[in-house]
Structure formats: C-alpha cells, structure tokens
Image: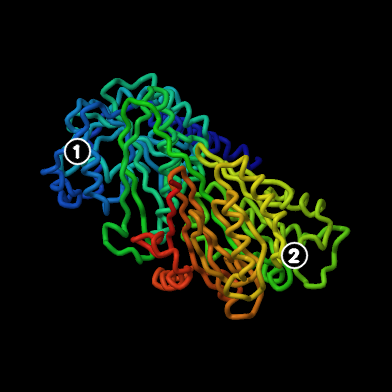
Amino acid sequence: MSWYSEYKIQLGVITLSIIIAILVLVSDNELQATKIIDSDVFHSSYSNNKTLYGVNSTKNLKQKFSDKVYGGIVSHHLLSNIDIAKFFYEFSDQDVDRVILIGPNHFYPTTFPALSTNLNYKTPFGEVVVDSVYLEKLISQKLVQVDNTTVDTEHSISSLVPYIAKYLPEAKLVPIILIRNAPDKLLGSLSEFLKENNTENTVVIASVDFSHHLFSNTSRLHDLRSISAIKSFDIKSLSELEVDSPQSLNVLLRYLMSIDVQDISLWQQNAAVIFDEHDIEDVTSYVFAHARKGDIRPEESVSVMFFGDTMLGRGVEEVISDGTDLFAGIRGPEGNFLRGYDAIAVNLEGAIASDSCTLNEDGLLIQPENLNVLTKEKISHAGIANNHFGRCNEETALSKVAEVNLKSFSSNEVSTIQGTGMDVGVISVYAAPVPNDFSEIVEKVKTASKDYDNLIVNVHWGVEYNTEPTSLQKELAHAMVDVGANIIIGHHPHVVQPVEVYNGSIIAYSLGNFISDQGGELTKSGIAAGVFLEKESSKLFIFPFEQIDGIPVHLTQEDSRKVCENLYNTNIQDYISDQHPCVIEVSND
C-alpha cells in the first residue's frame, strides 16, 4: 500500500480545513474593509491629560471669523498646543456637523495608501463619533480601507480629536491617513468625493507639520516656499515641499479649489519661537490656516539653493569609489536640508570625461557616472562655465551632464527656473581673472535682464585662495547689478569671500568649496546660499559648513552665527535679520 492510500483521508481533512480557514480569513478581511461594525471598543486620544492641550489659552480670545470656514491646516505636534487651540476656537461658533481630518500615516507600511477607522474616540473633553454612513461611502468606492490598529497609533489624528470634542462637540469625524507615496489618481478621487458628498457644514482639515529637525533659519526658508505654494494653490509643487504630508495638502487644496474656497489666511509658529531660543539645533515648524470663500491671493516666489566649488575628480573620485557618503553631513535628518526648493545648484569644478577626452593634467577630470552622486541628492543644476570645462569637448560634455538629468548653467544661454507663479533667469559668467574691459560681460547680463524680472548671475571669477574680492571683481559686480542682476553668486577662489548689498541686490563673492580634496585650512570651509525671491523682497540664507575628512558638515548654530557676523561688509548691517545673522533681506521697492 502506498503512503498516499494510507493517509489520503487525513490529507483530505487537512486540505479541507486549510481551504475553510482561507475562506474564513478572506471573508473576515472583506467584512473589515467594507462593513462598519458596532463595538464598545474605542480609540483613545493622544493623552487624557486636559492640560496638555492648552485649551485654557482661548478663554480670553476675541477674534472669530464672521464668514464660514470650509477647511484648514493645523499641526498635530502638541508643542504648539496653544496655536492648535486657537485654530479650532476661531471657527467654533459656526455649525459644523462633520470634520474630515486628513493626516500622514507616519510609521506603518500598508498595502492600501488611504486608511480609516470605524471606532469612535474617547478624549478628556468627551467622545468623538466616527461618521459611519460617510465612511461606508468611502469604502464602497474603494477610496479607503479600515485598519483600526494602524489608525489607533497615528498621532496626526489622536492628538487633534480632543480639540474636536472641545470646540466642535456636535461634529462627527471622518479620519483618513495617507502614506507618503499615495498615488496622485487616488488623491484626485478623494478630493472629488469630498466635493460631491460634503455639506455646507463640513470642514476638511489637513493635519500637517512643516519643516522637521533643522536649524531655525533653514525652517524659515523652507516654510516660505511652502506658504507660497499653499496660498497660490500650486498643486504641482506640493510633492517637493519639506512637510510631513504633501498628500494631505494635495487633497485639501484640490477640494477647496473645486468649491471656490481659495481665500487662505494663516500664521506660522516653530519650536525656536516657542522656546525663545533661535540657536537650537532641532526645530520643527507649524503653519495654521483657515480657508474661506474668495479668490486666490497668490504669493509668487522662487527658491534656489546654491553650493560652491564641487570636485568629483582626483581624490574625491577615490572617495566615491570607496562608497563614502559625501552628503552624510549636509543632507540633514531624513534628508530634509536638501528638500523644499525649486532647484539646487552646484559649480562643477572640472571637465567632463568622454571617449575623446580621458587625460587631464590637473586630475580634476570628472567621470560622467560620478555625476550620479549629485542627482541622487536632488541636485538639479550644475554650473559649467569654469577654467576646466573647456579642456574637453564642450558639446560632448554638455550631453554627458544632460544624460544624468542635470541641467546646465552655461554662458551661452539663460536658464529658467520655474517657481510658484514666477520664474527666475540664471546666466553663467566666466571671468577668471576679471578682464580690465568687462563691457562684453555686462552687455550679456543687460540683454538677459530684459527677459526676466528676476535675474541671478552665477559667476566664475576672482583669484584663487584670496579671501577678499579684487577691486575689478567689485567693479564688475556693481556693473552687473546696475544693468539688472538681482543676485550674484560667485565661485572659483576655493575660499569664502564676503557678502554685500549694493543698489538693492545681494552679492556673494565666493561660496568657497563644497566638495573637494584640497588640503589648505581655508579651503575646507564653505557656505551654501539659499535664495528666496518674491515680488516684495530678495532674501539670502547662509549655511556655513566645514569639511571633515573631505565630507561637508554643517556647523552648529553658535558657530554659524560667528561665521556670518564676520562675513559681511559694513554696508549690510541694515539688511540682517533680527532673528538670525545668517539671513539677509532686501526690499525690492
């Protein structure tokens, strides 16, 4: 007798049991995903301690909106509890029967990008009931799935439900959490669903925190761009913002646009202000916004981060080959320092190798594959007008740069960087050394300025290792400003040179080295220059760093202040921010 004949009955029973178990499991999962169930089980709010929520701060507040609030943006970080309480208080006297609360799924990977819960919340201010009828509709259209376990631990929801209980006690809740890579098609479908199913008394709120774990001046730069995008309803740029849930903002803004609610009023807050300590190393920032009926009040802007001389040949090539992470000390926690811009640019210090150009006497030849270390970090542009680039065929080199999706700042044409509602032109100038007759350069800048209201000149000039610009550099800089340059960003000296303001424009004479293998002490220091342009003003944010074992590393806030205080020419004092010496602001009046 074969083993199969002997055990076929037992095998049949086992097989049947497995099939039944699978069917039961599938059935249970389907019910979980499609049916709202009554239960005595509740979610708990983030804390049951009433004092943690700062609601006493609203007792003496007078300001409330006279017109209806249809949506908003609020932090879920309870360090900003007083501002959160103010956000909810300011529309607490209007009739609200439903709150759609959309936030990030911070911690848990999931097979479905949008999750909700069918359980109510217990808070220290009372119970918040989930709108089961509305949730059933979302589930039936396959826009969300129920996952009580994941939602239970998500503080973007649990930290805010006490405020709903306190200030909007009649409102039912529809919580939705989104993963960071939620597909755009789903986000569009969610916003369309909200339009079709919401009543006049529904408020849609995005639970979002803004810049995370950075210095206060970095947070300010990133938030300027975020606010510009939000107030301008610049949907396409949301994915690039340095916020914890661009997807939540996406759904909110699409929905508000669809119902003609585009008048956004907002205020900002951050940990540095709350603690009254602007040198702390880890700052999270918050934006609070209310949306009401009205037209868009756009805030047009462009944000660009510039780094200095970047060598990817010679000794740096060996470091790359060893697998060293060149950006470990500069990208910041979660890569946040290199997020939140319309463009990031470096000056390439070296020619680009090709089949016809394999030798270079100074060893700075850059292998095309090494350019990938830049694009991996979201660096979008590279300056190529330098004293090395022409040593190999320029047309071939430009094609190599383009192959890795780097855009070139060249001396032959003006590059356009698109921001929110406005563009900026960037033109490269080669002037190393500065010629006695620079009229041709000035004419090129003048011509470019006719096509752009905002023009940045990216200039390779000066004398190597000089810590001060030459008199000819200054003359050329002033001449370029006089014909239309708003910002001048310099490089080539391999050391940092001063920053000045002339005739309403900002001139950074040299950013120094960014990535290099040079051994001199001064060549190991550099600055990054964050440019923020808007109609009313031009701002320059300076971020000093030093190279440690060839890797650029941010200085502490205390040391950064010292660098910036020694960086400026005397005429710049009136333009330095009161909050931080590494921020310069010039009015465009």
Residue count near mark 2 (Cα–Cα under 10 Å), binned few <14, some 14–19, many ≥20: some
Relative to 116, residue 48 above or below: below
Give the numbered dot on residue 387. Answer: 2
Residue 578 x/y as whole percent: 34, 61
Residue 132 x/y as whole percent: 29, 26
Residue closest to the far left:
60
Look at the image and tell me in which quarter the N terminus lies. top right
- Tag in front: 2 or 1: 2
Q: Secondary structure at mark 1?
A: helix
Q: Earlier in the sequence, mark 2 or mark 1?
A: 1
**Residue 248 seen anywhere in this rendered image of the structure:** no
Residue closest to the far right:
356
Relative to 117, residue 442 above or below: below
Amino acid type at circle 2 is Asn
What number of labels is visible? 2
Front position in the image: 180 or 499: 499
Asked if residue 50 lies left or right of residue 440, the reply is left
Q: Residue at x 48, y 57 (%)?
A: 540
**Residue 412 seen anywhere in this rendered image of the structure:** yes
Front position in the image: 472 or 581: 472
Front position in the image: 428 or 515: 428
Q: Which residue is mark 1?
A: 89
Amino acid type at circle 1 is Tyr
- Which quadrant of the view contains residue 64? top left
Q: Residue at x 72, y 58 (%)?
A: 385
Residue count near mark 1 (Cα–Cα under 10 Å), binned few <14, some 14–19, many ≥20: many
Q: Secondary structure at mark 2?
A: loop
How much space separates mark 2 and mark 1, taking CA atoms? 61 Å
Relative to 440, residue 18 above or below: above
- Which quadrant of the view contains residue 74? top left
Relative to 463, residue 37 above or below: above
Front position in the image: 187 or 466: 466
